[in-house]
Image (cartoon, rainbow, N blue to C red):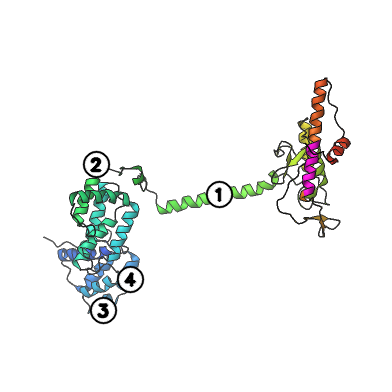
Amino acid sequence: MATPSMPARGDRTAPTFDPHQPRELRRYFSDLDFHFGRSAVGDEQERKKHACRFLDVDTCELWESLTTFTDATKTFKDFCEEVYRLYPGSEEERKWSVSDMDKLVGETSRVGILSLSELGDYHRRFLVITVFLLSKARISVAEQGRAFARGFQPELWARISQRLQLKFPDHFPDDPYNLQDIHDAARFVLHGTTAAYSATPTDISRAAPAAPPTNAIKAEDLATMFERLTDTFVKAITAQGTSRPADRPSRQPGQGGDNCMFCGSPEHFMRACPEVTEYIRIGKCKRNIEGKVVLSSGAFVPREITGSNLKDRVDEWHRRNPGQLATGQMMFTVNAVPTHPMTIASRHDSPSLLDVTPTYQLTDVQRIASLERELFALRTRGTRAREMAQTGRSAPTPSPVAERRAMTETPEPEP
């Protein structure tokens, strides 16, 4: 019977090694030894070449640059030992560490165990690591049990702990449970679960894993899709930016800038506009609690009503909606703490120069007197209306002069 030859690179029987999985290196060399024995490859240098032939380009160049590969006096065993030093974690002595155990426990606790299948997966992976650490005397049996218990989410561990207390009523709380006892209690608690652990609604600590796609997308195709999608967004944003100036109505003179937003005058701002005061007096508009000029109903002027400034828009709204004038009233506020005189900035011919002028402000006593005069005028008007209603005559509309006179008169104190 003819001796079989070594398999070609890429053959289904050829040994493989992933440099990102250092633990596979020992199996790779074990597969090479199997093929060397079957193909009767005894030359040390020939074995080194076969070991590099099945690798990818980068890994092959790395291995061929080693001194044990180029030195013919070095054996294949010396070459393997030098390769092991390139991949931490591939040596049999340091295959697993305590940090690997902590990483597995922390990840499982964060994700959670929701079914028996997930419990079995966690138990198998935990056993592989901890049995190795126990054999190297790097952890104790008590530490193994405590670490395994930390992998369960708090809700599940509470039920497992109840089960253990029922099975071992004399167990001292400070002593850890045995790994096998914890696993048996967890299997009992999760009995009947399939895809999810649904004891209580709060136990669901993560969403169910999504089903894998039926058609896998290559990385190259995905990158092309993202590139096309980015180009589409860029073109859309560019087209929107170029069409925006045409869609935007041209700015009309008198709007914004250094002019009054209400009347368009360059001599003042809308805060000190006399036209606003006049319109508020006749009931066409008012200021809301934020100080903004709104309609007498409290609503803003609709956007569909256009005009060169806010005054024209208010006039246009009242032209479309006649009979919406509100009765102007004098409104005063009383401050509990005396305030200092306020200053307003008035602009003259030069927009860059501001003249700071102090404004007159009523004292608390003067404001109270003004409110009393207004209340007296309102009471007088109501009394006249009732008298006219009793006599059957219509109440005459008092002139503004009479109203101001009534408001300036000091009311008689009520008995």
Q: What is the quadrant of the C terminus in the image? A: top right
> Which of the two labelled residues, at mark 1 and mark 2, occupies the earlier sequence position?
2
Residue found at x 18% / y 66% = 36
Where is mark 1, residue-wise? Answer: 233
Q: Which residue is mark 2?
A: 192
Q: How many marks?
A: 4
Q: Determine the CA span between mark 1 and mark 2.
A: 50 Å
Residue placed under numbered mark 3 in the picture:
71
Q: Is residue 119 magenta?
A: no
Q: Residue 320, relative to residue 122: is it above or below?
A: above
Residues at marks 1 and 2 touching, judged by CB atoms closer than 8 Å: no
Q: Amino acid at mark 4?
A: Leu
Q: Which residues are magenta?
A: 365-376
Neighbourhood count class around disc 2 (C-alpha, 10 Å): few under 14, some 14–19, many 20 upward: few
Quadrant hosting residue 34: bottom left
C-alpha separation, residue under disc 4 versus residue under disc 3: 15 Å
| Residue 249 in the image: above or below residue 67 | above
The mark closer to the camera, 4 or 2, is 2
